Amino acid sequence: MQTEIDLLAQNWEKKYDPTMFIGRLSWYSIPESIKITHDDFSKRVDEAFKDIDLKLGGVGRPRAVDVFKRGCTNAQLQKYIPTDAEKVALLSTWLTDITDINHLNFLIRPAGSDESHVWRVLVRETVDTEGHEIGFDEVAKIQYNRTTSDITITKNDAVDSIDVEDGVLGAIREYFIRETTIITPYAVREWIRKGLEGRLHATKVRPSGGIYYTLEDYSRSLGALKEVVNGVGGSFHTLPLIDDSDQRKMVRAAFEDESVSAMAEMMDEIREILKSGKTITSDRFADFKVRFDTQRVKIVEYSDVLDEAMDTSTSYLELAEAQIRVLADKVNIDEDYH
């Protein structure tokens, strides 16, 4: 379904020669209702970018351990109103009258982790009509095996249980089976953001974000990105930006602000490392280098398009380069092999 923005963009592209555009504005939204498997999403990306040299790459596969953790959070049940029979089953030495019980909360809390396993514990809170906790029981321990993805549930025999707890525990397994191949809306948003800010060298044109500017050279890749996002149920809009003095001024100001901020943040991080006297891994150093190189390329690209030197950004770039040279001596290659 075409929006007014889409129609306006099409009209401008028909009316004006491509050389009249200085670039494009874009914005997007991804609803929480999106459900798509990693394989299906990857196929859409491959198809949209098949004839385009500058590709964005794919979205990472869901980590099984993260799905397990989300499953535990999703399975929690609060303000469950127990039946009278269930209230009787919960009576204890400190709780002798079923009228004291208003509702139950079933919470799943962290209980430690190591390289092989992640543990959670299902706890039951008994709450009175005043909102006070009058009972607290550890109902079951839940163990996730990182290697096999097995979920082992061990119920606490010393605690009287009720049927609803089996439903909570079962919901963890059901979520894990159902969601292991599904990429989250957050993962889709991050794929878009990294694609725009990384591969397409986009710049946010307002401090709060949400609206990006990209150079016209990236218009085909931007179109492919739009095709993917709209195809999976999201909303992605682009609008050509007419080349005039006001638009150039806006783009230049936005780029300088973002570039200076990015390099200042990076230099602060490097300064803290140098001040500490500690060494860093080659991977950490490579991350700084990628961030620096990205800014350097963007400065060249934006300077060419705007026909104007980015003096402030260039000054910060020179300072950052000097810091990176010093940081190179702090790389501990030996740590990469431990």
Image (tube, rainbow, N blue to C red):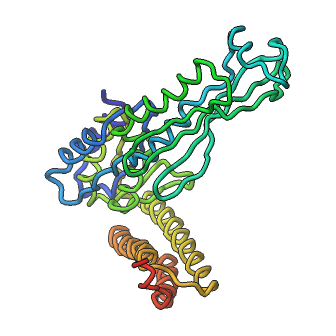
Q: Nearer the viewer, residue 334 or 189?
A: 334
Q: Along the horizontal axis of the image, is 18 left or right of 307?
A: left
Task: Name which quarter of the figure residue 135 lies in.
Answer: top right
Residue 14 drawn at (x, y percent): 22, 42
Q: Is residue 1 above or below residue 247?
A: above
Q: Nearer the viewer, residue 214 or 293?
A: 293
Q: Is residue 313 visible?
A: yes
Residue 300 drawn at (x, y percent): 35, 75
Q: Residue at x 20, y 45 (%)?
A: 48
Q: Residue at x 49, y 32 (%)?
A: 172
Residue reaching furthest to the top: 84
- Which quarter of the rendering shows the C terminus? bottom left
Q: Residue at x 72, y 8 (%)?
A: 84
- Which quarter of the rendering shows the N terminus? top left
Residue 188 drawn at (x, y percent): 39, 44
Q: Nearer the viewer, residue 238 or 61?
A: 61
Q: Is residue 329 above or below residue 97?
A: below
Q: Residue at x 33, y 72 (%)?
A: 304
Residue 289 drawn at (x, y percent): 41, 77
